[in-house]
Image (tube, rainbow, N blue to C red):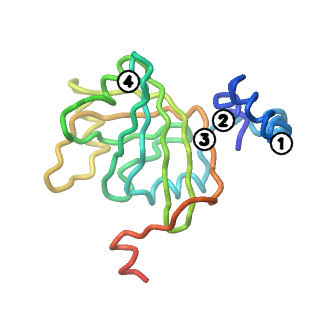
Amino acid sequence: MGRSFAELAFTPLVKEQQQRHGSRESYRRVEERGEHDARLGPEEREFIAARDGFYMATVSETGWPYIQYRGGPKGFLRVLDGQTLGFADLRGNKQYISVGNLNHDDRVALFLMDYVEQRRLKILGRVKVAEGTDEAAKLIAELNIPEKYSVPERAMTIHVEAFDWNCPQHITRRFTLEEISAL
């Protein structure tokens, strides 16, 4: 865990709970000595490129959290540089809850899972939505990975503010048909 993640996630009430449950001292050391850099390294880049989906949390203007799954072929979520991710956002159920929430608050939390290896990467960032302009069309074309029956509506780029790897504890192993076939 880096210092950037601790600074964003460890609010006073979180620190109070850490103190109450005995983990505050170890996390205080992370805040003091951890690296402040939120740049994605080779391990994070490789992990992200191998994912075929992720969960994205946004918050509405009324304060309610909303989590949406985004899926596609492996590599549809792209690392554009050390602190920027991007993907072509495909037409779905046409509720537009995530997009509406992002108009209010550009902060997101991404949760990327590898159920087979029992690994997870949490990313906190800020989203820019590109839609309806020539620049957006260019970015959508760059990020889109054509899929049958999928229509890209916009491009989303995410400036990574912080990330953290979680421990494998309590991750139930799950396998896709593709992964089972490879065994």
Q: Are marks 3 and 2 in contact (CB under 8 Å)?
A: yes
Residue 107 percent across, percent down from the top left: 48, 26
Which amino acid type is marked by label 4?
Answer: Leu
Looking at the image, is mark 4 or mark 1 earlier in the sequence? 1
* 52 sits to left or right of 108: left
Quadrant in the picture for residue 151: top left
What is the three-letter code of the residue carrying label 2? Phe
Earlier along the polypeptide chain: callout 4 or callout 2? 2
C-alpha gap between disc 4 and disc 1: 34 Å
Residue type, mark 3 in image = Phe
Residue 65's place in the image compared with 55, above or below, is above
Q: Secondary structure at mark 2?
A: helix
Q: Earlier in the sequence, mark 2 or mark 1?
A: 2
Q: Is residue 159 left or right of residue 39?
A: left
Marks 4/2 in contact by CB < 8 Å: the verdict is no
Give the Cα separation between the discs numbered 2 and 1.
15 Å
Q: Which residue was labeled with disc 2?
A: 5
Residue identifier under label 3: 163
Q: Residues within 10 Å of mark 3 (few under 14, many from 20)?
A: many
- The disc labelled 1 sits on which kind of residue? Ser
Image-based side of 79 in relation to 117, left or right: left
Q: What's the distance in space between the residues labelled 3 and 2, CA to CA?
A: 6 Å
Q: Which residue is mark 4?
A: 102
**Which percent across, then down, holds residue 88?**
30, 41
- How far apart marks 3 and 1 lie (CA) works out to 18 Å
Q: Quadrant of residue 16?
A: top right
Residue for badge 1: 26
Viewer-proximal residue among 122 and 81: 122
**Secondary structure under the numbered disc 1 in the rendered image:** helix
Which image quarter holds the C terminus?
Answer: bottom left
